[in-house]
Image (tube, rainbow, N blue to C red):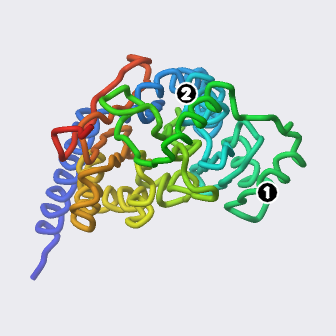
């Protein structure tokens, strides 16, 4: 029979075990590294200036959504950047068309694609998210919406971009060159994207992505940058991811969503990006030898990582320790083809 003495003894033992477990838990909590936030990361070397602008908001306790919008506007306004925004190279018909998307910690998102005459597509994308029931507006509709919201239309084809386009028209040949945004071997008539991911002091995550797309593309071509799940995806419970490079291959694999889902399964940001690249390689083993695709990701703890098909992809990191860090991404192929 289970007597009173045995009951008291068992109760004392249970209390001791509970106290021990609580103590062990407390010690484990003390040993656990604190989350690394606020923090902002972005693709390519030119992400440094964008990160620093975003950091002005994050350092004051501001919202990650405001930070990534402000950061993305920097390369959009940079007249020396021919792959994003105002000074982007045109399509083969001479039209500068811009794409962008944005996503917040609540899963809200907005995007524009193929928009002309409006210099800051990232801000228009945010208004699509906040003021319409839609996610994506394109072409003339996106332009009309932007003007209705107070944006002033302007000519985006700069003299330098027009000169490059007319030079291209002589041969009329299109062939993307890898990593040109990082001044790697290859011509300047390429394209690329800035993708940004930020975690604010509250631990909330947002992301932004903006581009002028492929230089001298077919009129109407849209890549992965404005496509939620391809060029950008954010899940506040898990983390976020963004992509860069030839968007067609990212779209085919719903790349950024894939990276986030892999992190949900326990992959580190680095390994999730690597696995996403390997899936692209497996699907198109011959095609990917000629093109670049890279992924950048961050998890809820503020741990980040990147991986690309080819050598040359870099990303920028900004936190309380350092605001101008540039890190070379890991990669599958060693050489960059001319």
Residue 202 seen in render:
yes
Left or right: where 336 falls relative to 291: left
Characterize the local packing of mark 2: few (<14), some (14-19) or many (20 or more) Cα atoms within 10 angstroms: many
Which label's residue is closer to the chain start, 2 or 1? 2
**Mark 1, secondary structure of its residue:** helix
Q: Name the residue at 65% across, 54% down.
A: 113
Q: Name the residue at 42% across, 49% down.
A: 241
Left or right: where 66 falls relative to 183: right
Q: Give the x, y percent position of residue 245.
A: 40, 46
The circle on residue 202 is none
Pick whichever, 61 or 328, lies toward us: 328
Q: Name the residue at 17% across, 50% down.
A: 16
Pick whichever, 137 or 64, lies toward us: 137
Q: Quadrant of residue 238?
A: bottom left
Measured in 3D between alpha carbons, the distance from the residue under mark 2 to the one under mark 1, in whole angstroms, is 24 Å
Q: Give the x, y percent position of residue 128.
A: 74, 54
Identify the residue position indicated by label 1 in the image. Answer: 140
**Mark 2, secondary structure of its residue:** loop
Residue 234 seen in render:
no
Counting the numbered discs, the total is 2
- Give the quadrant of the N terminus: bottom left
As drawn, the residue found furthest toward the bottom would be 1
Q: Quadrant of residue 304?
A: top left
Position of residue 276 relative to residue 298, above or below, is: below
Position of residue 229 relative to residue 312, above or below, is: below
Q: Quadrant of residue 219?
A: bottom right
Q: Give the x, y percent position of residue 259.
A: 35, 56
The circle on residue 81 is 2
Q: Name the residue at 38% across, 60% down.
A: 249
């Amino acid at each position: 029979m289970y007597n009173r003495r045995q009951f008291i003894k068992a109760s004392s033992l249970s209390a001791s075990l509970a106290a021990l477990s609580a103590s062990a838990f407390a010690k484990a909590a003390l040993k656990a590294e604190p989350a690394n936030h606020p923090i902002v990361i972005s693709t390519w070397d030119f992400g440094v200036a964008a990160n620093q602008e975003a950091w002005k908001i994050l350092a004051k306790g501001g919202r990650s959504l405001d930070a990534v919008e402000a950061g993305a506007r920097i390369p959009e306004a940079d007249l020396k950047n021919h792959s994003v925004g105002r000074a982007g190279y045109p399509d083969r018909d001479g039209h500068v068309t811009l794409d962008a998307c944005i996503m917040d910690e609540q899963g809200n998102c907005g995007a524009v694609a193929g928009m002309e005459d409006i210099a800051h597509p990232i801000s228009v994308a945010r208004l699509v998210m906040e003021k319409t029931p839609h996610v994506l507006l394109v072409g003339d509709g996106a332009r009309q919406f932007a003007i209705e919201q107070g944006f002033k239309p302007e000519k985006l084809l700069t003299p330098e971009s027009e000169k490059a386009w007319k030079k291209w028209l002589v041969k009329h040949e299109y062939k993307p060159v890898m990593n040109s945004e990082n001044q790697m071997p290859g011509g300047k008539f390429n394209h690329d994207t800035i993708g940004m991911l930020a975690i604010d002091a509250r631990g909330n995550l947002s992301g932004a992505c903006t581009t002028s797309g492929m230089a001298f593309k077919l009129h109407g071509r849209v890549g992965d940058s404005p496509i939620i799940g391809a060029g950008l995806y954010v899940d506040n419970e898990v983390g976020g991811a963004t992509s860069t490079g030839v968007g067609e291959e990212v779209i085919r694999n719903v790349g950024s969503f894939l990276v986030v889902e892999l992190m949900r399964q326990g992959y580190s940001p680095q390994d999730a990006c690597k696995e996403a690249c390997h899936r692209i390689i497996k699907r198109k083993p011959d095609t990917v030898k000629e093109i670049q695709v890279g992924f950048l990701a961050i998890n809820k703890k503020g741990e980040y990582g990147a991986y690309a098909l080819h050598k040359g992809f870099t990303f920028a990191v900004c936190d309380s320790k350092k605001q101008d860090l540039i890190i070379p991404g890991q990669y599958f192929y060693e050489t960059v083809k001319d």
